[in-house]
Image (cartoon, rainbow, N blue to C red):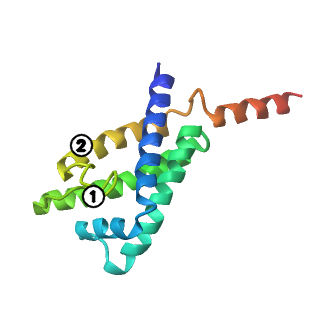
């Protein structure tokens, strides 16, 4: 049962990351404006984050969906989510009220409160993926099986 929960968690988190990152990649300037609105990073780093973070989301999402290097991808995802949670939490504490920019820049990503709830759920799902080392329907499992066959021969 835990393998099923881990697999569903892996596929859900991977899909959301892939989707979110893919929406941001073509619009780095808009994403930079969203990052700037959070007011938690030095201004000099915002453009680098706006270019790099969506690609990290996409690559992590693809790895999670494929089930390749799952633990590393899940840990990377967890790191991103913790950073997002901190930025969201700081702004909720400040009383800020703006669209999170999580899934594009049209306001469809929801408020910071909604984003906070979503990021907590995604962090929990990512923790399940990190902890459960067995995941059916994954490239890691297929590679482990083929290596086991090779070693036994």
Which tag, 1 or 2, sits closer to the chain's start? 1
Which numbered tag is attached to residue 143? none
Front in this rendered view, residue 86 or 19: 19
Q: What element carries label 2?
A: helix
Q: In which quarter of the image is residue 37?
A: bottom left
Q: Which residue is drawn at 65% across and 32% down?
A: 141
| Residue under the point 77% across and 32% down | 146
Question: Which of the numbered marks, if any, corresponds to residue 117?
Answer: 2
Position of residue 89 relative to residue 119, above or below, is below
Disc 2: CA contacts within 10 A as few (<14), some (14-19) or many (>=20): few
Residue 115, given in percent of the width and then of the height, sits at: 25, 48
147 with respect to 24 (left or right): right
Mark 1 packing: few (<14 Cα in 10 Å), some, or many (20+)? some
Q: Are marks 1 and 2 in contact (CB under 8 Å)?
A: no
Q: Residue drawn 81% across and 28% down? A: 149
Q: Which of marks 1 and 2 is in front?
A: 2
The residue that disc 1 covers is 86
Q: Give the quadrant of residue 23.
A: bottom left
Q: In this view, does 78 lie above or below 94?
A: above
Which one is nearer the viewer's eye here, 129 or 9?
A: 9
Tag count: 2
Q: Where is residue 62 in the image (x, y as percent from the top left)?
A: 55, 45
Residue that protrudes farthest toward the right in the picture? 153
> Circle 1 — which element?
helix
Where residue 3 appears, as percent x and y from the top left, is 51, 24
Quarter placement of the C terminus: top right
């Amino acid at each position: 049962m835990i393998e099923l929960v881990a697999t569903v968690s892996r596929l859900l988190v991977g899909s959301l990351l892939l989707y979110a990152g893919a929406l941001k990649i073509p619009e780095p300037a808009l994403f930079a404006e969203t990052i700037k609105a959070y007011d938690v990073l030095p201004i000099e780093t915002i453009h680098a984050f706006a270019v790099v973070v969506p690609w990290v989301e996409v690559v992590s999402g693809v790895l999670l969906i494929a089930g390749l290097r799952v633990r590393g991808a899940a840990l990377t995802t967890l790191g991103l989510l913790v950073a997002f949670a901190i930025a969201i939490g700081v702004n909720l504490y400040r009383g800020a009220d703006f669209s999170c920019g999580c899934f594009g820049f049209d306001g469809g990503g929801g408020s910071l409160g909604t984003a906070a709830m979503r990021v907590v759920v995604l962090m929990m799902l990512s923790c399940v993926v990190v902890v459960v080392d067995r995941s059916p329907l994954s490239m890691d499992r297929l590679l482990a099986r083929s290596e086991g066959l090779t070693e036994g021969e």
